[in-house]
Amino acid sequence: MARLKYRGEEIEVEYNTVGDYVAATYDSPPEYPDTFIDAIYYNEVDILPILSERDQDEIHDLLLDYLY
């Protein structure tokens, strides 16, 4: 679980990753595992079902920045 700040509020993101990290080489960029969000908690309530796709994408980007 990751604790993130989104629009000034603290949220907790429950996620899973699939795949492995592959380091960059001279010929290719690094490859990261696929990351999927399972739940987003605000005040211990899962708000994922009521978030817009845009909000979910923004939180996903924040999560990737947090992880990598």
Image (tube, grey):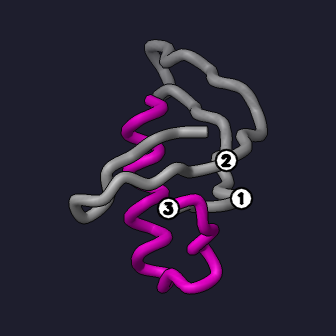
* Image side of residue 21 versus residue 55, left or right: right
Of residues 30 and 56, the one drawn nearer to the viewer in this rendering? 56
Three-letter code for the amino acid on which mark 1 is drawn? Asp
Q: In the rendered structure, which segment of residues is drawn in magenta?
A: 43-68
Q: Residue at x 64, y 47 (%)?
A: 35
* Image side of residue 21 versus residue 65, left or right: right
Residue 56: in magenta span:
yes
User: Residue 23: image x %, image y %?
Assistant: 55, 16
Distance between mark 2 and mark 3 Cα atoms: 17 Å
Q: Residue at x 66, y 61 (%)?
A: 39
Q: On the image, numbered disc 1 is attached to which residue?
A: 38
Question: Which quarter of the figure has residue 21?
Answer: top right
Of residues 29 and 59, the one drawn nearer to the viewer in this rendering? 59
Q: Secondary structure at mark 3?
A: loop
Q: Which quadrant of the rendered structure holds the N terminus?
A: top right
Q: Residue at x 41, y 79 (%)?
A: 54
Question: Which quarter of the figure has residue 17?
Answer: top right
Residue 67: in magenta span:
yes
Q: Residue at x 64, y 57 (%)?
A: 37
Disc 1 vs disc 3: which is toward the camera?
Answer: 3
The prevailing secondary structure element of the residues shown in magenta is helix
User: Residue 60: image x %, image y %?
Assistant: 48, 57
Of residues 10 and 56, the one drawn nearer to the viewer in this rendering? 10
Q: Which quadrant of the rendered structure holds the C terminus?
A: top left
In the rendered structure, are the residues bearing label 1 and label 2 in contact, judged by CB atoms less than 8 Å apart?
Answer: yes
- Res 15 label: 2
User: Residue 27: image x %, image y %?
Assistant: 48, 21
Three-letter code for the amino acid on which mark 2 is drawn? Tyr
Q: On the image, numbered disc 3 is attached to which residue?
A: 43
Three-letter code for the amino acid on which mark 3 is drawn? Asn
